[in-house]
Image (cartoon, rainbow, N blue to C red):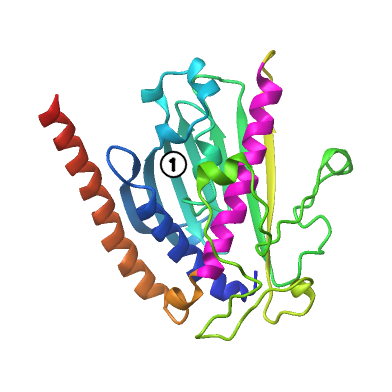
């Protein structure tokens, strides 16, 4: 990312807020149950959030054979003490995570389990570093873990598209032609990571285990592809929207979050009341 680590905190908050608004319409979207400061011995001071995600229409067709569409709901708790965070989510089914776990959510560590499939586990751990993406083993993995780890470099300037890019949605920005008016950063040409200043990397460790005969491997591959597309799009948005968030303080962002949370909940309440009138 062409940011400092400090700038990324604001960029991420703004991106999460805006993507939640974009993905909330009708009876689907994000409901914010709590958003408040917290302080404890483990994380120190930070922000606690509790949210419910309803994104039924984004699930692949084959998934609905294993769970009813009204069960495609996820509840998430997050303790965000940037740059250290933790999220614990319980979901009624699983592939929804590939659409929201890192785009609309803010945690640097996520642990997701599924009551429908008790053996299923997905974890996402993130470390942010002020470098160009070439650090080795930033997560401190063992030799055994390193032997099965697969490393992928996601370039926000890439214009690659696939099925999950279509499902998640993709901005039309061409970063080879884009330049921020406020910062002068860009365009992002080949090899930009080695020439950009500031530059930082979000190192994401994704671990998936779905030990189910017949569809476990398909599920794991779908989740990895979904996470990859979401990581890419959400971080593309961070840079595409730089002139909207650059210069904002954390305090201002907290105020905007509160306004956005209220707006999200009002949208869902209005849609629910409309559905009741129709029925």
Determine the residue positioned at 67% across, 25% down. Answer: 218
User: Can residue 66 be seen by looking at this rendering?
Assistant: no
Q: How many marks are shown on the rendered structure? A: 1
**Residue 66 belongs to the span the image colors magenta:** no
Of residues 39 and 7, the one drawn nearer to the viewer in this rendering: 7
Q: Quadrant of residue 262?
A: bottom left
**Residue 232 belongs to the span the image colors magenta:** yes
The magenta segment: 215-240
Determine the residue positioned at 58% across, 61% down. Answer: 235
Q: Quadrant of the C terminus?
A: top left
Determine the residue positioned at 59% across, 75% down. Answer: 178
Q: Quadrant of the N terminus?
A: bottom right
Residue 236 x/y as whole percent: 58, 62
Residue 31 x/y as whole percent: 32, 44
Q: Is residue 227 depicted above or below 208 in this figure?
A: below
Residue 157 x/y as whole percent: 67, 65
- How many residues crowd mark 1 within 10 Å: few (<14), some (14–19), many (20+)? many
To which residue does mark 1 refer?
Answer: 76
Residue 147 x/y as whole percent: 89, 40
The main secondary structure of the magenta stretch is helix
Q: Secondary structure at mark 1?
A: strand
Judge from the rendering whether residue 254 lies leftward or rightward of residue 278; answer left or right: right
For this orientation, the residue located farthest to the left is 277
User: Can residue 219 be seen by looking at this rendering?
Assistant: yes
């Amino acid at each position: 990312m062409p940011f400092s680590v400090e700038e990324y905190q604001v960029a991420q908050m703004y991106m999460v807020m805006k993507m939640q608004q974009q993905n909330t319409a009708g009876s689907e979207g994000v409901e914010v149950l709590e958003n408040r400061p917290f302080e404890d011995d483990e994380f120190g001071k930070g922000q606690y959030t509790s949210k419910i995600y309803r994104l039924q229409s984004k699930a692949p067709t084959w998934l609905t054979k294993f769970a009813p569409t009204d069960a495609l709901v996820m509840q998430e708790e997050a303790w965000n003490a940037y740059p250290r965070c933790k999220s614990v989510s319980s979901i009624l089914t699983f592939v929804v995570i590939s659409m929201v776990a890192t785009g609309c959510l803010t945690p640097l560590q996520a642990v997701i389990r599924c009551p429908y499939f008790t053996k299923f586990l997905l974890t996402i751990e993130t470390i942010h570093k002020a470098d160009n993406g070439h650090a080795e083993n930033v997560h401190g993995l063992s030799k055994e873990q390193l032997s099965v780890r697969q490393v992928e470099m996601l370039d926000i300037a890439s214009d690659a598209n696939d099925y999950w890019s279509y499902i998640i949605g993709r901005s039309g920005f061409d970063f080879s032609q884009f330049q921020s008016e406020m910062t002068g950063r860009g365009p992002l040409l080949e090899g930009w990571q080695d020439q950009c200043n500031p530059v930082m990397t979000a190192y994401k460790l994704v671990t998936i285990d779905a030990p189910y005969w017949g569809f476990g491997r398909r599920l794991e591959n779908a989740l990895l592809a979904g996470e990859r597309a979401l990581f890419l799009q959400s971080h593309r948005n961070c840079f595409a929207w730089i002139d909207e968030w650059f210069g904002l303080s954390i305090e201002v962002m907290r105020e905007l979050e509160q306004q956005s949370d209220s707006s999200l909940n009002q949208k869902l309440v209005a849609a629910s009341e409309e559905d009741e009138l129709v029925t």
